[in-house]
Image (cartoon, helix red, strand yellow):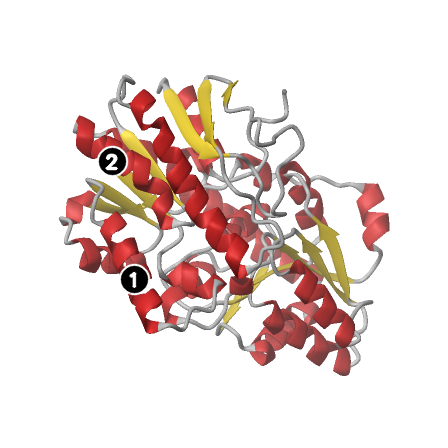
Amino acid sequence: MGQHFWPEGFRINDICDYFVASGVDVEVLCGLPNYPKGEFFPGYSWKGPYKEEHEGVVIYRAPELPRGDNSSLRIFLNYVSFPIASLLHLPRLMFGKYDKIFLYQLSPVMMSISGIILSKLRRIESTMYVLDLWPENLFSVLNIRNRFFRRMAEKVSHWHYRQPDKIVVLSEQMRARIKDITGLADDKITVVPQACESLYEREIHDPVLADHLGEGFKVVFAGNISPAQSFETMIEAAEILKSEGLSDISWVIVGDGMSRGDVEKEVERRGLRHVFRFEGHHPVGDIPKYTTLADVLVGCLVKSELLEATVPAKVMSYIASGRPLVLAMDGEVRTLVEDEAQCGFVGPAADSAALADNIRAMYQMSAEQRREFGARGKAYHFTNLERSIVLERLKGFVLQG
């Protein structure tokens, strides 16, 4: 079972490894891996395995309904299945020897319920790391218009945020929002950006992949293909650039997700099949092979005031790779990329014309000018965002007191 321990590639994996290397005993409760394809990974099924060990980390798993076809119903059932199933572990957890509880909050926010209950019953200090802000993230994935359900989602989400003793967030905007929701003291909420694994810092020159991708200017996207990523913006920008005769610009999409089928159909419908290359899901270790070949790295978010407080994990990985960034996102991302790291251009979310303008500007630069953008980003990464710097801050906040 050697490769079955961390199949989904979430960054909690690296956090656990860092804590163990620092002398902390770590036990994890998580679900059966099925993201982003919506089916169990090879080696996993309803039969388990439900307990594993990986380099000092003890891993317990709870049954979880896979996302399947990523329909709204299946996503909803996936969201509620793990929180409910995780409660089955409470009798075992009640007798464990724990000093701290760490709640790694992606989606759904309810995934933290067992840790919250355990913290209250055992009076163990809990810290929640908020990466997907709810219900904002929920509304970006599912088109929920019913006022009752929207209000219910808000109440459930805010209840979860009010339970932990301490909270870690990704940005100052998010910190302000969480403080409004929870009323926690200033010293109980801290900002710690997501740390990217050191593998993203590498350059891996793969001649086979280079031959596969061919010549020309490569715009690379790496990550989840979901509604929140606003692929419509990328497709429209590609259409604009194609109409201008810039035929040697190709968009390389590395990843998978609930929107992939729809995105590929839209690319086909607009006659852009030769412009886009969909590479599918790859192990995280393969991503540097693609970023090494990239002339520019691209990312978008949908237009939403609710998402302005987020700083996507891919932005940190992109900066570490030493390649220039072109993003269509609102909020603090612009300050990070343009003002602090000075490693790329950031236009408004959902603004395909601005995205096309920024990609064209990078395209018209010399290779040396683009290298300078990437070098500034990498230097900023090693000074401010490098793995050990960020994770030491996180560990100190979680374990203090």
- As drawn, the residue found furthest toward the bottom would be 243
Tell me the SS state at disc 2.
helix
- CA gap, disc 2 and disc 1: 20 Å
Task: Please tell me how crowded label 1 is: few (under 14), some (14-19), or many (20+) other residues with Cα within 10 Å.
Answer: few
**Residue for badge 2:** 117
User: In this rendering, does residue 154 appear at all?
Assistant: yes
* Residue nearest the viewer, comparing 382 with 194: 194
* Residue 223 % position (x, y): 59, 52
| Quadrant including the C terminus | top left
In the visual, does 319 lie left or right of 127? Answer: right
| Looking at the image, residue 145 lies above or below residue 322 | below
Asked whether the viewer can see residue 393, the reply is no
Towards the viewer: 350 or 132:
132
Task: Look at the picture and state if 25 lies above or below 237.
Answer: above
Q: Is residue 300 above or below residue 165?
A: below
The disc labelled 2 sits on which kind of residue?
A: Ile
Q: Earlier in the sequence, mark 2 or mark 1?
A: 2
* Residue 127 in the figure: left or right of residue 321: left
* Residue at image point 55% right, 64% down: 227
Residue highlighted by disc 1: 152
